């Protein structure tokens, strides 16, 4: 059975959790979150119950699945325990959760630095969630980060906290006029959580490798999305980790050769949260209509999302960067009752047409969408369960986009509920 990477194909919030849930019906054994932290969220609807997950893999909601937090994730232990407690109170078994010993820890000083630094930037703010994600990844790259395994050697933990705080306290006190943070308060806070975490901690890279070698199905679940990738996104308005399919291997501790399928998730329109360029953004009644109908408010932050029409160059870029084998298009129902549905098929940059993403940040910032309009549909599509049941115009919309983006659209979301989805092709490639 395959290793399957699920990645966001736009700027996030596309519905990756729903895609993971869809695959759960095929007998998934492991779901591995391989990047990010609690700066993004997945919403999964099961019956009348809605679950908002921030740090935990969405596979934790599927009985029999082993959920894994991989080495590429940065973990706020308070958030982790809060999420576990919340799910347990609702009757969800979390006992199978595994946490990589090599994952990095978000501390209180990371969150403090994140907030004060963002405020200090003023008009140049990135739009961070203030949850310490960026500073934790910065410490990882600067080799002063704290890893989960450090919790179980107090001497090493103390030495690493001292090294990390030496420079940060100068910055907090002398630049930001904040109080210094003591080594003891950080060490004591982390050690108080260590024993609860201990049964979950292990060599998850080895565990996942052995599962794949034994023929089990493993889903690698990305946080954030391609356009927020630190290397390939709209830098600097990006997250601090690798959100693409390439990150699934490095963030989980397995070989790229063990990833057989790459499933990209896109909405039938597009949204983003935070600052940065957004060619198809709608600052009008159409943007508000998409926001209201689609419930476009952040799972983690509650912030209203910026909304726009579907962007083909971005989806084509996602296909190329990730090697997408299948797309899942979510929220097609949001577009019902529109007379015309515009789709951005290319960009105009100072009179020059771009059919692909411009490599220049400046060009992308100044890109104006070139639209092609498709006839809309008025029918309620939430009850459709086959592609043929969709209105002809809805079918044509999906097929036209599929042709332009270079990979098949194998599943289509027609509502928020777990079963409100149309599956056109086997996401695991069995019908190829």
Image: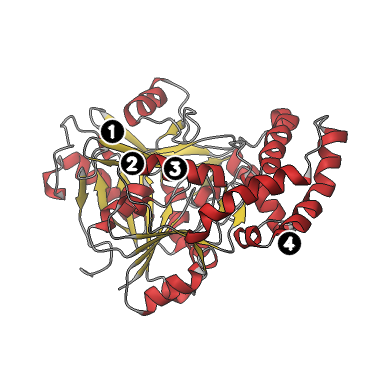
Can residue 126 be seen here? The reply is: yes
Circle 3 or circle 1, nearest the eye: 3
Q: Which residue is mark 3?
A: 83
Spot the residue most to the left.
Answer: 389
> Does residue 350 lie above or below 313 as drawn?
above
Q: Secondary structure at mark 4?
A: helix
> Tag 1's secondary structure?
helix
Between the residue at mark 1 and the residue at mark 2, the CA separation in whole angstroms equals 8 Å
- Residue reaching furthest to the top: 285
Query: Looking at the rendering, in which quadrant would you find the N terminus?
Result: bottom left
Label 1 neighbourhood size at 10 Å, few (<14), some (14-19), many (20+)? many
Name the residue carrying label 4.
156
Q: Nearer the viewer, mark 4 or mark 2?
A: 4
Q: Secondary structure at mark 2?
A: loop
Alpha carbon of mark 1 to alpha carbon of mark 4: how far?
Answer: 55 Å
Percent across and percent down for residue 223 are 48, 50
Q: Residue furthest bottom?
A: 213
């Amino acid at each position: 059975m395959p290793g399957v990477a699920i990645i966001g194909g736009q700027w996030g919030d596309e519905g990756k959790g729903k895609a993971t849930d869809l695959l759960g019906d095929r007998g998934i054994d492991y779901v591995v979150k391989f990047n990010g932290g609690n700066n993004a969220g997945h919403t999964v609807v099961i019956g009348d119950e809605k679950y908002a997950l921030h740090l935990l893999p969405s596979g934790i909601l599927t009985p029999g699945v082993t959920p894994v937090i991989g080495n590429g994730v940065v973990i706020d232990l308070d958030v982790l325990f809060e999420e576990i407690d919340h799910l347990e109170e609702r009757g969800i078994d979390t006992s199978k959760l595994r946490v990589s010993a090599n994952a990095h820890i978000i501390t209180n000083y990371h969150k403090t630095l994140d907030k004060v630094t963002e405020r200090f930037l003023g008009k140049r703010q990135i739009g961070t969630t203030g949850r310490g994600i960026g500073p934790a990844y910065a410490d990882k790259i600067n080799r002063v980060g704290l890893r989960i395994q450090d919790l179980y050697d107090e001497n090493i933990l103390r030495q690493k906290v001292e090294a990390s705080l030496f420079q940060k306290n100068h910055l907090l006190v002398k630049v930001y006029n904040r109080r210094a943070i003591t080594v003891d308060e950080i060490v004591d806070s982390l050690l108080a959580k260590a024993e609860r975490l201990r049964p979950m901690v292990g060599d998850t890279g080895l565990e996942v490798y052995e599962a794949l070698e034994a023929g089990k199905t493993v889903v690698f679940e990305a946080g954030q999305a391609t356009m927020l990738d630190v290397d390939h996104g709209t830098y600097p308005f990006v997250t601090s980790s690798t959100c693409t399919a390439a990150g699934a291997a490095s963030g989980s501790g397995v070989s790229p050769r063990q990833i057989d399928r790459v499933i990209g998730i896109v909405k039938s329109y597009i949204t983003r949260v935070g600052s940065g360029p957004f060619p198809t953004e709608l600052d009008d009644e159409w943007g508000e209509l998409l926001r209201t109908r689609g419930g476009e408010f952040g799972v983690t932050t509650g912030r209203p999302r910026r909304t726009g029409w579907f962007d083909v160059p971005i989806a084509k870029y996602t296909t190329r960067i990730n090697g997408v084998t299948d797309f899942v298009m979510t929220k097609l129902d949001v577009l019902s009752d529109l007379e015309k549905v515009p789709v951005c098929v290319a960009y105009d940059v100072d009179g020059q047409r771009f059919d692909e993403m411009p490599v220049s940040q400046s060009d992308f910032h100044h890109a104006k969408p070139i639209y092609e309009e498709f006839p809309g549909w008025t029918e309620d599509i939430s009850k459709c369960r086959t592609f043929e049941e969709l209105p002809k115009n809805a079918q044509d919309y999906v097929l036209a986009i599929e042709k332009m983006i270079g990979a098949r659209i194998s599943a289509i979301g027609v509502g928020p509920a777990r079963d409100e989805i149309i599956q056109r092709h086997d996401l695991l490639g069995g019908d190829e």
